[in-house]
Amino acid sequence: MTSSHDALYRAICAQPDEDTPRLAFADLIEEDGEYLRAQFIRTQIALSQVPVYDPLWVKVRQYDPDAPLGHCQTDTLPRVPGGYDWHHFEFRRGFPWKVGVLSPDAFLSGGEAIFDAAPIQALSMDTRTRPDFTGLARWPHLARVHRLEVPIGWLKATGATQLVDSPFATNLTELMFEVDGITADGLTALAGSSLFERLRVLDLWSNSMPSALLVDALAAAREPVALSRLSLSNNRLGHDDAAHLFALPVMRAIQHLDLSDNPLKVEGVTALAESGIVRQLRVLNLSKTHPGVPGVKALTAASGLTGLRMLDLSANRLGPVAVKLLAACGDLPGLCVLNLAYNPVGDLGAATLAVSPSLSGLLELDLRGAGIHNVGAIALAESPYLDNLLRLDLRPIERRSFSHKARAALTKRFGDRVCL
């Protein structure tokens, strides 16, 4: 890099929350002919300023699906000091912000060098080593970290207490625990802490603790909390624990809720619908929860869905009857993204969606593997209500193609906004 490049890059690393040096860097490299990288930086900065259901996000999912995580920019990853690697990486706002930690020694012995290599604000602990939470809690540079990911390591109550009491954990706003990343007593200690009150994002994926203990642990959370995004994907959460979960005070401010891959079934989704928390939801992921027609009916009959902007009901074995309930729901005028992929929607379901004025605000409709054939495709192409669609995904599971007439109708109506 030239001295100008180097100075700007150092400014980005020194001020990772600022966008101005990032945009200046984009302008500089564009002058040098790196148009694609410059555009990537600008796109990610723009994405960071809008929700995932915004038209910009929809367009990126259609035309540049690698952009959100930065997989298209791996050749720009800088060299990192020993103890770190890019096995776990993620770009935000145009530059790598997450790095993998191979060993606790990486940050215990002068690990500040990583922050000179890139504007790092997230650490992902490697699954091959148990993190030293005592050392991490005493690490002054923890103050630079916004997100901590622990895919393995058994954060117990003692370690959780050390972490939440750390004077350097003041900027932690996102936590992720996966598989056996945290124990029930560790989560209880975390939930009852002042750190938890500051959290905006909590991801609990595929945890090994019983779902009843997970819910009980979250019950320890004090009010008020800042938590707005909660993921409980694949935690074997059944309907027996669902009503308890949805009644917890911690759920009252959630706007982005991921319950995917849990056996909620009819009773669990009905409990969600009747709990009242759907009123504040903007994003709801119920993929692989198997609500059945009664669960969908309870959801669409619940008052207060007018704020919902993104709904994922993929892979739930939902057919035309469930689709009809969605299409007839008058509380979904603001819905921007609807995912019905891998459901037996069929041509009848597609035709029902096509004539629904309630879904006229849709920007994205995902019907991958939904059994849509020529009749359903033509119905979608002739819909009087889908003018706002920026992305329509009709890719099939099986090897087949639409007829020339159906393809022509879809292309004429949606152009490159349709995936076939």
Image: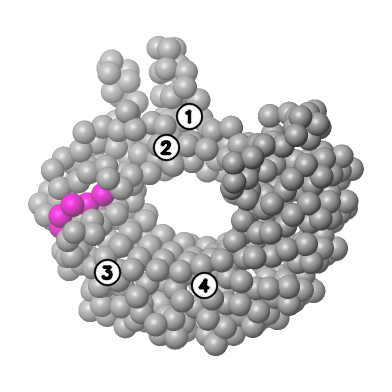
Quadrant where the image shows the C terminus: top right
Q: Tell me which numbered mark, 1 or 3, is placed earlier along the sequence.
A: 1
Q: Which residue is mark 1?
A: 40
Provide the secondary structure element on which disc 3 rests: helix
Q: Which residue is mark 3?
A: 163
Foreground label between 4 and 2: 4
Asked whether residue 322 is in view, the answer is yes
Q: Which residue is mark 2?
A: 70
Q: Residues within 10 Å of mark 2 (few under 14, many from 20)?
A: many
What separation in Å lies between label 1 and label 3 (alpha carbons)? 35 Å
The single residue placed furthest to the top in the displayed view is 32
Residue positioned 77% across, 70% down in the render:
300
Foreground label between 3 and 4: 4
What separation in Å lies between label 3 and label 2 (alpha carbons)? 30 Å
Residue positioned 81% across, 31% down in the render:
405
Give the residues in magenta: 99-104
Q: Which residue is mark 4?
A: 262
Provide the secondary structure element on which disc 1 rests: helix
Residue positioned 10% across, 52% down in the render:
109
Contact? badges 3 and 2 (CB < 8 Å): no
